[in-house]
Image (cartoon, rainbow, N blue to C red):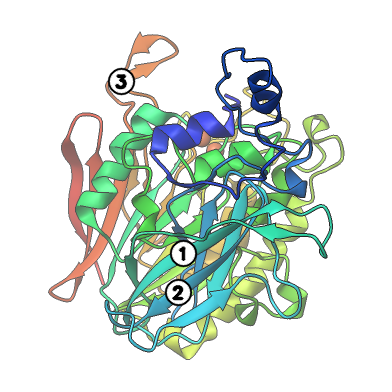
Amino acid sequence: MERDDGMDERFTRRGFIVAGGALAAGSAFAEGEGAASTNAPVPTPKPMLPDDPILGTGDVPLMVGAPCLQAPGETTMGVSWAVSGLSKGVVEYADNPDFRDAKTAKGGGYGLVPIDVSALQVRLTGLKPATKYWYRTVTTPFTDYKNIYEAKLGEPIVSPVHSFTTLGVGAAARFCMINDTHAQWEPFQMIVRKLKELMPSAVVWNGDATNTTQKKSTAVGIFLDPPVEDGDWAADIPVFFESGNHDFRGSWISKKEEVILPRDPSERRGDQWDLKWNFAVRLGEMALVGLDTGEDKPDAHPKWFGLANFEAYRRAQAKWLEEQFARPEIASAKFKVVFCHIPLFAEEGSAAYPHDGVKIDPDDYAHWSRECGELWGPIITRSGVQLVVCGHQHRFRFDEPTAERPWAQVVGGGPELGVADGNPDESKFPTVVEGKVEEGRLRLVVHDVFNGRIVLDRIINA
Ligand SMILES: [Fe+2]
Ligand SMILES: [Fe+2]
């Protein structure tokens, strides 16, 4: 479902931080001045906005969204946030709540710092592993940017202080996984409320966050400014992102890194540069590894208009995966957990089995990915992975390990609230999948956030 809300409506619902633009006397109130000279009633002044948002915010107050923590690492942390007009932004941060010896980080890399009309992104680097930091964003509108010589800034807007803890061996081994939220706001609110209650070290947003994305504003609404009560959920919980098949659909979506920061460049080798969101990190005794299963149909499918190149992408990730498990810090983790959107197998003989994503499917829907299973499954098995965490099927599922497949697979539910195709269906509920190390054991808990119950609580064998 395409969401096409106006920015003002979204920002108003979230109760964003607002600051007035610099009033340009003689322009903003031109209508009123003319009226006053004839003693007619003075009309309410209307905010003035330049014709093109990239020319500045004019007299329209800038609205600034809550920050979202993205692409967390041991020594890096991404921060993205929504803005309603042309602005610049920095992040101030410190390892203490008083901001003693605070540092200020700008966006971009070397050279020019990017500015934007809808989303700002800053990456903090050089952080200490497994360390708590406090931070706030400082956003300043360009009220006028007709050219660099005459550009004018408005008043800076400082966000409330938030905090996060970097990843690493010393961090608390506790993750949550959410999936298939599909911009359905009622289940999304249930999910993010549960996340705020559980406060994991990090969340993996495991695909199908979107539907079909034709505009950047749609992605900003989904990832940075969701219209729900707990829309600031990612201000204090870092979020990994892995795409689902829907996150490759729409005329804008190939630019999603403008809203969702990819992994830090230092993690990515040149020949693996396009593996933008793949991650392999330590979180206490766990290693978390994220893979991208891509679209759910073969590259040659006529629906893709020749735009799909996922088969080579999956092979490149197989090579990357092998290398990640060879890294000493990943290899030495007691627990290894892999995340990907589409499940890696279905039981032979099950209803899902024929829908494997490698042929033109009469149902037009893959239930699992034979290609990813065949490419990655043997590496996952050899590397001692205990758990694979997926989505895509919109129905909670748990597969016990077997002798041939020594890892368990858990699949989270979708956004449907007890209905399927208009009929009651108790098996349809959104979930938060929680994994944590307790007393040296990996415990998996699946929360059904619609019915308020736990549908799975078990120890995954080490
Ligand atoms: Fe989905
Ligand atoms: Fe999916």
Residue at the disc numbered 2: 92
Work out how far the residue at label 3 is from the one at label 2, CA to CA, in angstroms: 44 Å
Whole-percent x, y for residue 197 in the image: 20, 50
**Given this view, does label 3 or label 2 mark the residue nearer the observer?**
2
Whole-percent x, y for residue 318 in the image: 64, 67
Relative to 52, residue 71 above or below: below
**Which residue, as the protein is rendered here, is positioned at the far left?**
439
Amino acid carrying mark 1 in the image: Thr
Q: Earlier in the sequence, mark 2 or mark 1?
A: 2
Work out how far the residue at label 1 is from the one at label 3, CA to CA, in angstroms: 40 Å
Image quarter in which the N terminus is found: top right
**Given this view, does label 1 or label 3 mark the residue nearer the observer?**
1
Please say if the residues under marks 2 and 1 sit with CB atoms less than 8 Å apart. Answer: yes
**Residue depicted at 53% across the width and 36% down the height:** 367
Q: Which mark is residue 418?
A: 3
Image quarter in which the C terminus is found: bottom left
SS at badge 2: strand
Amino acid carrying mark 3 in the image: Gly
For residue 378, which quarter of the picture?
bottom right
Residue at the disc numbered 1: 137
Q: How many marks?
A: 3
For residue 355, which quarter of the picture?
top right
Q: Which mark is residue 300?
A: none
Tell me: 252 left or right of 333. Answer: right
Tell me: 144 left or right of 18. Answer: right
Relative to 396, residue 20 above or below: below
Amino acid carrying mark 2 in the image: Glu
Residue 356 shows in the view: no
Tell me: 61 left or right of 297. Answer: left
SS at badge 1: strand
Whole-percent x, y for residue 98 in the image: 27, 79
